[in-house]
Amino acid sequence: MHTIPRLEAAFAEVLAASGDGPISVDMANVTFIDSSGLHLLARVASSLNGAAPLTLVNVPRRVLRVMEIVGMQDLPSIELRNEE
């Protein structure tokens, strides 16, 4: 929750610059994610309006497990990809 405003601002910049291009987020350094972070990722992915999925790469196993529990891997607007 504490870092959501900064993350929202960063996503707003990226979305403004990317147009309809795909967006990838390297999650390698994420050690914790709560419902606020999950909701933000879902909102960003939804804002792409199907133009491309929001691709989350290098998702640490413990973060990936949380995402799997809530079903994020089933959202068509999000792609989880581990490249580690």
Image (tube, grey):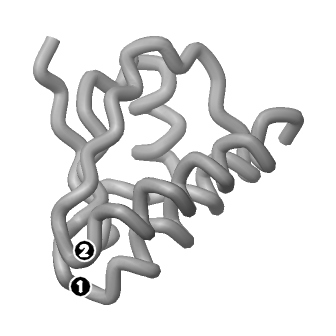
Residue sitting nearer the eye, 71 or 48: 48
Residue type at the position of mark 1: Gly
Could you tell me residue 75's position as x and y percent?
33, 70
Determine which quarter of the picture holds residue 48.
bottom left
Residue 17 rendering spot, x and y as whole percentages: 35, 63
Residue at left offset 28%, top offset 64%: 18
For mark 2, what is the residue?
76
62 relative to 33, above or below: above
Residue 6 image position (x, y, % from top left):
73, 41
The numbered dot on residue 50 is 1
Q: Residue furthest left?
A: 83
Q: Is residue 69 above or below residue 63?
A: below
Q: The residue under label 2 is which amino acid type?
A: Pro
> Whole-percent x and y of residue 3?
78, 35
**Which residue corresponds to the image point at 37% horizontal and 16% vertical from the top-left?**
28
Front residue of 55/19: it is 19
Left or right: 76 with respect to 43? left
Secondary structure of the residue carrying numbered label 2: loop
- The reply to whether discs 1 and 2 touch (Cβ–Cβ < 8 Å) is yes
* Mark whose residue sits in front, 1 or 2: 1
Asked whether residue 74 appears in the rendered view, the answer is: no
Q: Quadrant of residue 54?
A: bottom left
Q: Quadrant of the C terminus?
A: top left
